[in-house]
Amino acid sequence: MNNGTNKTIDPRCLGEKPPLAIDIIVNLDIFGMVLYGILTFMAALSMLLYLEECVYIYKKVPSNKKSVIIWVNGAAPVIGTMSCVGMWIPRATMFTDMTSACYFAIVVFKFLIMMVEEVGGDEAFLRRAGKHKLKISTGPCCCCCLCLPHVDITRRTLFLLKLGSLQFAVLKTVFTILSIVLWTNGSFDLTNLKITGAAIWINPFVGILTITALWPVAILFMHLRTTLRTLKIIPKYAMYQLVLVLSQLQSAIINILAMNGTIACALPFSGPARGYMMSQQLLILEMFIITLVTRLLYRRPYDPLPEEKDENCENTKMVAVAESA
């Protein structure tokens, strides 16, 4: 017999699938309409600003930098737009998240290429940096391994740095396609963390690939941050890192809390579905702000980097390392 303290749980709170788009529209109140309207406007404005900036870059930027700058600039608008789609169509969240992750995997590689191109390309980079050494004891892999030797900067070293980031762009896309194929077969489920599930094997491996790809970018940034200081490379790198943290780490934390039942049900959303929804809404707002900041950083004249006047003016830290070695 039920007593007065017992509560009836709505069956929709126990559902595994997110609601349909029409269910969200029907259940929106005034606050929900305003919230969805504002967030949709932010996502649309982010994409419009990005497209306008693409036109500016196409007209004003040297040909060797056009592609990489457009790719790097598109990280926040693309993720914000995909989050908007996932907000309106919750059952597409897995696909929108995968699309955003694949795009950012390419951005990681393109950011490394952008730093090399800002110096003047491969030949100019090797000519400038050939007399220095690379410090490889940097995050996210080896920040605690201070005993690692410094590496000579050669054409082979540059190739390995590029390869380290390129593998993530390629393999992330491959594993995304594999995940979708397994999902159609019922073998891939993000909420299934059992040892027999595919997600528990694929996701950690992708995490290792991510860390491996971020390492070459960090190594090159630590070497060129003084040389490219006038080109605002430090705030650009900070925005790149912020997109990474918000789109990957923040979303993962919210989704874990949702799957553990920490986030309560709010009809028509179950607890996990509400967690995914909160993650999408936060990303739209955050990516809109990052879009505005990156617009200020990248919409500028792109003059060639001045040739270094002497051996000590490019990067004093790396010169000191080379001399001490």
Image (tube, grey):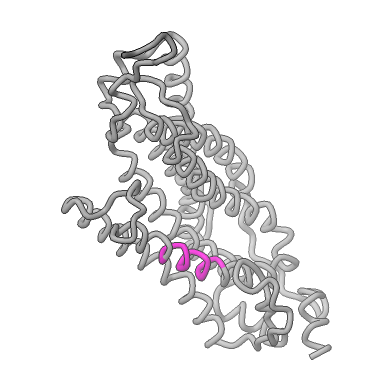
Above or below for 24 versus 143 = above
Report the quarter where the N terminus lies. Answer: top left
Kindly give the residue lying farthest to the left in the view shown.
185
Q: Which residues are magenta?
A: 205-214
Above or below for 60 versus 141 = above
- Front residue of 313/204: it is 204
Q: Residue at x 55, y 73 (%)?
A: 121
Q: Residue at x 49, y 44 (%)?
A: 251
- Front residue of 31/291: it is 31
Above or below for 285 versus 110 = above
Residue 235 placement, left or right of 94: right
Q: Residue at x 83, y 81 (%)?
A: 320
Q: Is residue 209 magenta?
A: yes
Q: Residue at x 63, y 56 (%)?
A: 237
Q: Most prominent secondary structure in the magenta stretch?
A: helix
Q: Is residue 105 magenta?
A: no
Rendering coords of residue 211 (x, y %): 52, 66
Report the quarter where the C terminus lies. Answer: bottom right
